[in-house]
Amino acid sequence: MEMVQHNGEYGCVMCEDPGRVYQQGKGHCRAFPLNDSPLALRSPDTVVSNAVEASNTNSIVKGIKSVSVLFGIQYLDPIVACVPDYMHGLLLETTKKLLSLWLNSSKEAYYLGNEVK
Ligand SMILES: [Zn+2]
């Protein structure tokens, strides 16, 4: 499927959270704030449905731009087939930064250190 970039609205390959744009330094970034309500997770059915609607209306539907020829492959799950962004997630140390925030910020609402054994 063709999707918006990771920093675009609905850029998450796993869920249908549009995210929010925040000012950061001299620029801005898209982030996904903590949600009290459960997020709508993407499924193969919703991805295909969004892709078909996007193709039919020539628009972007929940971050998905078009149908992919890969949808014709039997047993292909478009959610599982999308791998995490290696360059931004690992090489630029985003994962390391997130783990540090989640596990070392005991006074913050996002602290997860007491949830980990
Ligand atoms: Zn997500």
Image (cartoon, rainbow, N blue to C red):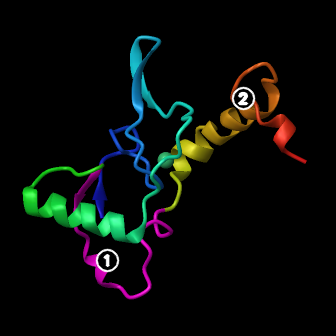
Q: Residue furthest bottom?
A: 74
Q: CA distance from mark 1 to mark 2?
A: 37 Å
Name the amino acid, label 2. Leu
Toward which corner of the image does residue 70 lie, by quadrant? bottom left
Residue that numbered label 2 is attached to: 101
Quadrant of the rendered image containing residue 6? top left
Magenta-drawn segment: 63-82
Is 81 covered by the magenta stretch?
yes
Name the residue at 14% across, 62% down: 55
Residue pushed farthest front? 37
Which one is earlier in the sequence, the residue at label 1 or at label 2? 1
Q: Is 83 contained in the magenta span? A: no
Image quadrant occupied by the N terminus: bottom left
Identity of the residue furthest to the left in this view: 57
Q: Which residue is mark 1?
A: 70
Q: What residue appears at the point 34 percent right and 45 percent down from the top-left corner? A: 5
**Residue extending farthest right:** 117
On screen, residue 116 versus residue 84, left or right, reads right
* Kind of element beneath mark 1: helix
The residue that appears at 35% across and 71% down in the rendered structure is: 45
Secondary element at image label 2 = helix
Mark 2 vs ligand 1: CB under 8 Å?
no
Q: Residue at x 38, y 45 (%)?
A: 11
Res 67 → quadrant: bottom left
* Residue 50 position (above or below residue 104): below
Number of numbered discs present?
A: 2
In the image, taking residue 106 as reference, residue 52 lies left or right, namely: left
Callout 1: CB less than 8 Å from ligand 1: no
